[in-house]
Image (tube, rainbow, N blue to C red):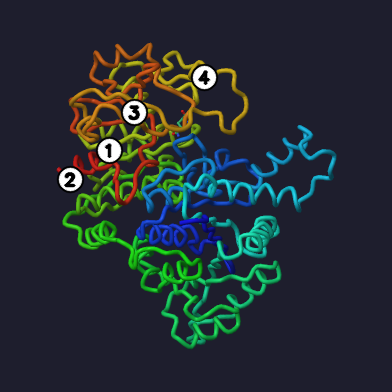
Amino acid sequence: MNNTKYIFVTGGVTSSLGKGIVSASLAKLLKARDLRVTIQKLDPYINIDPGTLNPYEHGECFVTNDGAETDLDLGHYERFLDISTSQANNITTGRIYQSVINKERQGVYLGKTVQVIPHITNEIKDSIKLLGENNEYDVVITEIGGTIGDIESLPFVEAVRQLKWELKQDCLTIHLTLVPYLAAAGELKTKPTQHSVKKLQELGVQPDILVCRTEHNLEQDIRDKIARFCNVSTDSVIQSIDAKSIYAVPLLMQEEGLDKVVIQKLNIATKELPDLSKWNEFLEKQNNPRDEIVIGLVGKYVELQDSYKSIVESLDIAGVSNSCKVKLKWISSEKITPKNVEKKLSGIHGLLVAPGFGERGIEGKIEAIRFARENNLPFLGICLGMQCAVIEYARNVLDLKKAHTVEIDSETPHPVIDLMEDQKNISDMGGTMRLGQYDCELTKDSNAHKSYGKTSIKERHRHRYEFNNKYLEFFEENGMVATGKNPSNQLVEIVEIPAHKWFTGVQFHPEYKSSVETPHPLFIGFINACKT
Ligand code: GLN
């Protein structure tokens, strides 16, 4: 293909319409037609990245191989497309302004007044076009965060308006809207869509395709009406009906002909139909599980399940690959006490203790781990979950009663989890953790080795604290061993208890490297252990 094609996805009426899933589904359909596709998310907030955001704000922070802390939609992109994204795939207003202000300080603008148009919009346009450089991709999909009409996303929409003008036939805009059903009237209502498109038109952007979220089928007359009011052809009014699983959305979009309209409008020559055989196999298995297990997920943000998005999806995907339905029992770490732990963890086949920061709920996590260790319950601890497993072992097996992580207790006499040397003088919070992909060497015949089926792996990190190697010998002599280490600095990346049925704590985040077509081996290993 000659020119890279650009697709912009905007959202109207309300947030949470699932722009990320629709964008990822379209990308999947195009990739399944052998096109080289990537997706990018533009976020209108002023944070440089979501790394400093509380999960209550925007859910999980997703981490890429290159160590970028990004929006959770990038997790969907990777899981749908089986690709790796990078910092270039997630841009925030804060990052755009930071870059423009840095250039202003360097004198790059040669004495000009620095303004939203053209300087901020040019910076946005450059960030979009960056992915299309070097002929790496046939199609770049850019999802604009926020809802049309928000003040904060105006510069992004203006950049889209300008790019539509510059790129002409090589770009198109998809607008996602809501067609609500009013039960009292017994009708689907098109007015919010009409208004949202009007708003977009006021900003100079005529959408080419409308994807309409709805709880009921859109009959032909409704589609005709939307098309007439919004200046789009009827075949460009695409229904996006609620699906049982997010992974069914690509098929629904295909049935509606979204990919077909897109390739027609962009004049892309591809094979006639997308090859979705692997994807269909996955859905088939998802719909017909042979077994069912319950995993207890202990964390402190259990009321907001988006906080653990990648973990939930990784468990689900790994379960499907095993024809096993994974049910989750959400357990708030703050509510676990030595007295109620047995009851709280009742009915589960395995325990997963989630990543996290800070003191809240940490004693509950430690208590849950003690229960799993003592009762031979399969356990997977991720990042803080692994650190808690180490603290629990130190306190209850090694008899280091006051053992802790210095993150919580800087005066602990037994800092079994300690700050890394190179972290000691850092005062900035943003982007300063150990981030991104690092090598790890596995011990033969460990749970990890059996799961991965190889001894050299690469996994993504996001943490400041580490297993304190001064204690390693003491742990290993007493039954908890390091089965994964960073080969260049010997940092402990995995701990296991070989005498236990399946007890594995990982300092890294396996959930960031799991996709529908490549389920993560460690989650598969954990689920297998829970099943037997
Ligand atoms: N708070 C811990 C650290 O910074 C663990 C972080 C995490 O779980 N992602 O080391």
Task: Pick the quarter of the image with the C terminus.
Answer: top left
Counting residues from the N terminus, which is met first, the one under dot 1 or under dot 3?
A: 3
Q: Which residue is mark 2?
A: 531
For label 2, the crowd category at 10 Å Cα-Cα, with few meaning under 14, some 14 to 19 and many 20 or more, is: some
Q: Which residue is mark 1?
A: 522
| Residue density around tag 4, few if under 14, some if 14–19, many if 20 or more, within 10 Å | few
Most extreme residue toward the front is: 2
Give the amino acid at mark 4. Ser
SS type, badge 4? loop
Where, by quadrant of the figure, is residue 159 drawn?
A: bottom right
Q: Say which quadrant the N terminus sits in.
A: bottom left
Is ligand 1 less than 8 Å from the beta carbon at label 1?
Answer: no
- Circle nearer the N terminus (2, 3): 3
Taking 504 as reference, is 224 above or below it? below
Residue 143 against residue 56 in the figure, above or below: below
Quadrant for residue 466, please give it: top left
Q: Amino acid at mark 2?
A: Lys
What percent of the width, then of the height, locates residue 185?
51, 87
Earlier in the chain: of badge 1 and badge 2, it is: 1
